[in-house]
Image: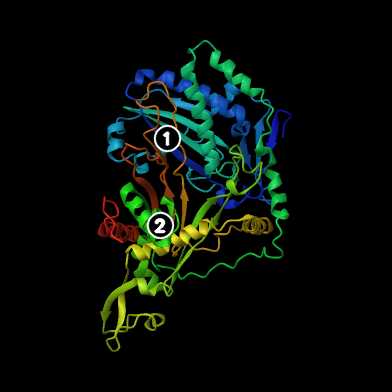
Amino acid sequence: MSDNEKELELSFLDQQSHIRVYGRYYIVFSFPDIKHAYEATRSLHIGFKEVLRQFPYLAGTVRMPYIAKDDLQVLFPSPIDLETEASRIFTSSLRPAANDFDYAKLAKEHFSPGCLPAEIFCPDLIKHHPGLDDNDPFGEGRTSLTKGPLPVFAAHATFIPGDLVLSVWFYHAVIDGKGNTRIQEVWSTAVRSLRHYTQGTGTIEASLEVKAGDNATDPNLARGELTSLAHQVDVGNDITRPEKTFRYPLRESSYRVITKMFRFPAPVINGLREAVSNLQNKHISHFSALAAVIWANIIQARLPLLIASGSTKSTLAIVVDLRKHLRAPFSSPDYLGNLVFSEMPTWDLFEQANSIIGRVVKDEEDVPDYLREYFKSSEPRAVVREARLKLVVPTLTYFAAEIHDAVHSIDEKRIGKQLGQVLANPFHTNHSILTFCNGPDLYITSWQHMGADREWCIPGTGDTQPSAIRRAAWASEGGIVVLPRKADKEGNMSAPYEVMISLAEKDMDAFENSLEEGRWLKDRCWNV
């Protein structure tokens, strides 16, 4: 480390190997007149200087100084030259991209991530970076850091006909999803404040300099204190690593994993939430209702494979933010580091056998032995060969209630236990006992409140708010991401719930058929 650098200490949660990847997403704005491109990029540039002023380590690099130790290190310039670093990290393409992309086409496809390829929209600072692994020119996969350091953060503004796409790549070991939401908030607030000042007078620059003198302690400097927090909570000796749950592989042959985006109408999710809340006599969230629909329909799609393989359980790992459950400095919105773990409700085929129906057949030869005692019919020697879930409100109520109860089970002792387990074994996460690849388990994370309603007021844009925020296309079997959504407002049409889901190709086909059969992607009325 040189005299002109500082180190950001990472917590033991930041050091986990599974988050050594770039989080990647796009903020899409309508941009009707390319003549305003310079004003737009200048505003974004000035606004980003405020981001660096508050979080200077975003100008740093992440590296692995000693490969054998497998520990990450983040170094950043100090003092920081805001103008130089902002120009290096945030770049732009003032010439419109190829005419294969335009706002009207993207809007027609609901800004599907598949329409925004990384080779076009990857930030310049990341694209073909020498520290990236071979065959990963755009930082889309797991990074080994064996070829050298990588940028902590990068952003790029790409102009296409009628459109401005703001691309953001952030290194997940340094910043989690909630932390990135805070970066968006600071950036958009700084850009929006430019409306109140005359361009070129320096007034806004002077205003931002006032903030630079703020002596408030940066909570990110306390990441190392997370270790103390893990030790403070008395969990006795209950920090043993859970054994990995054995899961039979769903398939024996090779297969392809694909990712698609689905749009669930708000009235469908709202109606289910109300129905389930009434049955449970408790407030069920929209997230729980949405996740229940997805989880149940994926089980429906996989049920023949689950039965044939002997996998009788499916666990949904729900990523939960811990900030609101912890004291300062970890409760601060300015704490950008990783602060999540997974709650894991489990569906058991045998426990929920009464929610399964099927076709009764005479021939028992193709039916697994373990199912015979559970699926008997009144007809002698007949068993169920083709099983299906009853996707009705009582069944969905079970899924929603399991999700609700899991998310609301968090307390200080539970957090301490989870932190203690990771501290005792840094290579362990609580969901590492599950099987996502060729297995029955799933994981879900919500970006719903990432800032779709945030006003940027970028010069030249057709709206003060983005048209959409999209996670960049990715494929990770069993992965589910709820995308950013505008909040419901009285008098306005409610936005749909948009979700990216990654499944084996045949599972995806069956999942889509199940959604179509249940009319989940169309407005409907609920009868309980």
Q: How is the image coloured?
A: rainbow
Q: Is residue 373 above or below residue 258?
A: below
Residue 97 picture quarter: top left
Q: Is residue 505 above or below residue 36?
A: below
* Mark carried by residue 453: 1
Name which residue type carries label 2. Ser
Describe residue 181's horizontal placement relative to residue 528 as left or right. right
| Figure disc tally | 2
Question: Is the N terminus in the top left, top right, bottom left or bottom right quadrant?
Answer: top right
Location of residue 450 in the rendering, given as x and y in whole percent from the top left corner:
47, 40
**Pair 2/1: label in front:** 2
Q: Residues within 10 Å of mark 1 (few under 14, many from 20)?
A: some
Location of residue 378 in the rendering, given as x and y in whole percent from the top left corner:
29, 86
Residue 74 picture quarter: top right
For label 2, the residue is 277
Q: Secondary structure at mark 2?
A: helix
In the image, 140 versus 41, the foreground residue is 41
* Mark carried by residue 230: none
Name which residue type carries label 1. Asp
